[in-house]
Amino acid sequence: MSSLNEPRWLDQDEMAAWRGFVVASNLLNRRLERQLKEDSGLSHQQYEILVHLSAAPGDALRMTELAEKLVTSKSGLTYQVTQLERMGLVGRRSCPSDVRGVIAELTDQGREMIRRAAPGHVALVRELLIDVLTREQLAVLAEGLGEVSARLRRDETPQ
Amino acid sequence: MSSLNEPRWLDQDEMAAWRGFVVASNLLNRRLERQLKEDSGLSHQQYEILVHLSAAPGDALRMTELAEKLVTSKSGLTYQVTQLERMGLVGRRSCPSDVRGVIAELTDQGREMIRRAAPGHVALVRELLIDVLTREQLAVLAEGLGEVSARLRRDETPQ
DNA sequence: ACAACTTCGTTCGAATTTGAACAACGGGAG
DNA sequence: CTCCCGTTGTTCAAATTCGAACGAAGTTGT
C-alpha cells in the first residue's frame, strides 16, 4: 500500500497556492469586468484587444498574432474585432504580404477610447493587486508565472 | 507637467507581474479545460462544483454558499447544477431550515466521477504550475494571492 | 403584528466563447 | 510547375455566462 499508482496529491501549501491563484483570478476578472463595463462600456477582452493594438508598431496586428497575445481562440477574436469595428474603435485591412491575412488596426476613435479607459483600469489593477503586494512578492510572481506561461506556450506551440 | 492628474502607470516589474498573471491564468484555464473535457467529459467549472461538494460536510452545500466558493454568479450555478443533475452527478433537495433554500448534494455517481477525474487533473496542475515553481515561490504565491483574494472578498461582501 | 428591507434560487434575454468545418491561399518537395 | 500539407480567418451550432427582474420567503425595527 504505497503510492505506486496513487497520484501525488497537493499538500496544504500547494493547495493554498493553487486555490489562491484560481480565486484571485476569478475575483479579479469579475471586478475588472464590472469596472470597465461601467466606466467605458468595454469588456475586459475588448479592452485588452485595444491595449495590444496600441502597443504594436503602427497600432496594428495580424489576427492570428493578436489572438496569440490575447490567449484566445481565433473565432473568439473574429467576433470581438467585429464588435469593436461596429463601435468604430478598430478597423480591418488586408495584409500586403499575404492575401489571406487580415490586419486589425486602431482607429483614431480607438486610440481616444484607450486613452480614456486606461487610467481607471490601471488604477484598479493597482489597488486590487499591485499595491497589495510587496516589491519582492511582485518580483517572485512575475518570474514564477512568467516561467509557467513560457512552458505552457512551448507546449501549445511545438514549433 | 507633474503627475498631478496623471495616473500611476505600471512600471516594468509591475507590468511583468500583471501580464504574467493574466497570461498564465488564461493558458492554464485553457489546458485544464481541454484535459478535463477529454478525460472526463466535464468542464472545469463542473469539476470544481464536484470538488467543493465533496469537500463539504455531507457532500452537500447550499446554492448561494457554493456560488461564493466558486466565485461565480448564482444564475451560472443554477445552470451548471442543472447540467450535473442531468448527468446524474448531483442532486437537489430542499433545505430544512429555510424553505427558499436549495441544497446541492453529490450522488454516488458524482463521488465516483470525482474519484476518477481528480488524479488526471491534479497531475496536470502539478505539471503546469506547482512543480514549475520552487517551494519559496509557492509560499509567496499562496500568501500574496491569498491576501489579494481576502481583500477582494471584503470589498464584495461589505457585511 | 406589520411594513420595509434583505435574501434565495430561478428564469429570461442577450452577449460571448468555443471547436469543428470550411474555402482560400502559401510554400516547399519532387 | 504541381501536388500536398499547413496556415488564415470566418462561419456555424452549441454551450456557457452574466445581470436584471422576479416571486417567494426570511428578518428587522417599531
Image: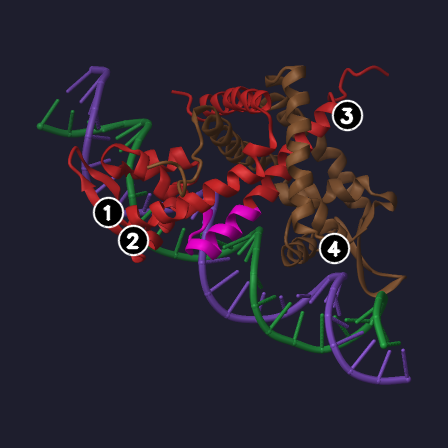
Chain colours: A red, B brown, C purple, D green
Label 4 SS: helix
Quick check: do tags 3 and 1 share a chain? yes
Query: Mark 4 and mark 3: span between their CA atoms?
Result: 26 Å
Residue at mark 2: A85
Q: Position of residue A125 (x, y in %)?
A: 51, 39
Residue at mark 4: B64
Query: Which of A50/A124 is in front?
Result: A124
Pointer 2 chain: A
Asked if disc 1 and disc 2 are in contact, CB closer than 8 Å, the reply is yes
Q: What residue type is labelled 3?
A: Gln
Pointer 3 chain: A
Q: In this view, does C6 lie above or below A151?
A: below
In the image, the segment drawn in magenta is A30-44
Residue at mark 1: A92
Asked if disc 4 and disc 2 are in contact, CB closer than 8 Å, the reply is no
- Lower sequence index among marks 3 and 1: 3
Residue beneath the point at 74% across and 49% down:
B66
Q: Is residue A35 above or below residue A22?
A: below
Q: Position of residue A61 (x, y in %)?
A: 28, 37
Query: Mark 2 and mark 3: span between their CA atoms?
Result: 48 Å
Label 2 SS: helix
Residue beneath the point at 30% across and 49% down:
A112
Q: Which mark is residue A12?
A: 3
Q: How many neighbours does mark 4 have within 10 angstroms: few (below 14), some (14-19), or many (20 or more)?
A: some
